[in-house]
Image (cartoon, rainbow, N blue to C red):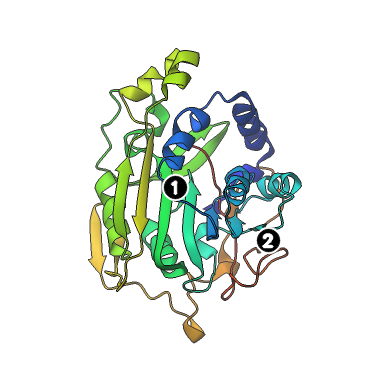
Amino acid sequence: MSRQNVYDDEAFFRGYQQLRQAESGINAAIEQPGLRALLPSVAGHTVLDLGCGDGGLARELAAAGAARVLGAEPSMRMLALARARTADRRVQYVQAFAEDLRLADGCLDLVVSSLALHYVADLGFVLNQIAGWLRSGGGLVASMEHPMRTAELERRDDLAATGRYADEGRRDQSWYVDGVVKYHRRISTVVNLVLAAGLELRAVTEPVPTPAALAARPELDRHNRQPAILVLAAVKPAGFKQAGFKPVGPNQLSFGREDHEGEGGVRDSGDGGDRQRRHRGGPGAGRGGPSGPGADQRFVRGPAAGRRDRGPG
């Protein structure tokens, strides 16, 4: 399947860096406070930051006492920033799409993901992978663009634009460049996929701007009327068992887990060699994964291929 890696597009990367440096988006004002509100203590824990971007959250997790942090990110440009900005040897990075990351079962205490999962076509498969990587009692904390916004990406700040909410699937957006691909799912679909992966939901939140953010940027008040971000927290229970169903089309769930088992029990999402990155003007296609340079071999299980775009809401 073709996957997009828009962060290695020079025009997109430049525009997004300007957005973050100016803090004119919703990351600092809404998404990051909402995500951090659900994070457990990480002292002594092994953590995966899935879609780590420039490594800011990974570095914060290490500073908060995590024993090891692995940041997974498909973009070469973002990984270059992450590595340049990270001195802590407890933090390591690997180039991989979420769908292609291969880790050992039970190797993690926590998976965090900031504004990455709405770029994943097969969210059910990724959640199943995450559930396998977690130890019993381990947790997932993830933020994503709210379905009220992904329903109508080209009109996402229009409070009346919810007409396609029930129509799940791919959405193409013009955002710095044309054709930025995201995937719209209803809240109920997201929740059911988490439960199908065998995880127990602990919280689902729709954060709004903080009072300090509203005082500084009154225009953020529109997000009190239409939520911008969805955040969820879940844990892997004792007696873990996956329900084994995944979406097969808009508004459909199919029982009978798709076969992702390769030889030796290594999960394999398909022939990575056929995957093409879709981007404009970025570096050439290549293979990347946790077995690549700088990867901590304690995490690694099996091959990986490809890259996936992480991005903001």
> Residue 286 has which mark?
2
Looking at the picture, does residue 107 appear above or below residue 51?
Answer: below
Label 2's element? Answer: loop
Instruction: Please state which amino acid type lies under the numbered disc 1.
Output: Leu
- Provide residue 48's location: percent of width, then percent of height: 54, 58
> Residue 214 has which mark?
none
Task: Evaluate whether residue 313 shows in this view.
Answer: no
179 or 108, which is in the foreground?
108
Q: Is residue 177 left or right of residue 124?
A: right
Label 1's element? Answer: loop
Q: How far apart are marks 1 and 2 (CA)?
A: 34 Å
Measuring 30% from the left and 52% from the top, which residue is drawn there?
202
**Which residue, given by chain and number where applicable, does mark 1 sit on?**
39
Instruction: Please state which amino acid type lies under the numbered disc 2.
Output: Gly
167 or 137, which is in the foreground?
137
Looking at the rendered image, the disc whose residue lies closer to the viewer, 1 or 2, is: 1
Task: Evaluate whether residue 83 shows in this view.
Answer: yes
Dividing the picture into quadrants, the one containing residue 253 is: bottom left
State which tag comes first along the sequence, 1 or 2. 1
Dividing the picture into quadrants, the one containing residue 16 is: top right
118 or 133, which is in the foreground?
133
Q: Residues within 10 Å of mark 2 (few under 14, many from 20)?
A: few
- Provide residue 135's location: percent of width, then percent of height: 43, 69
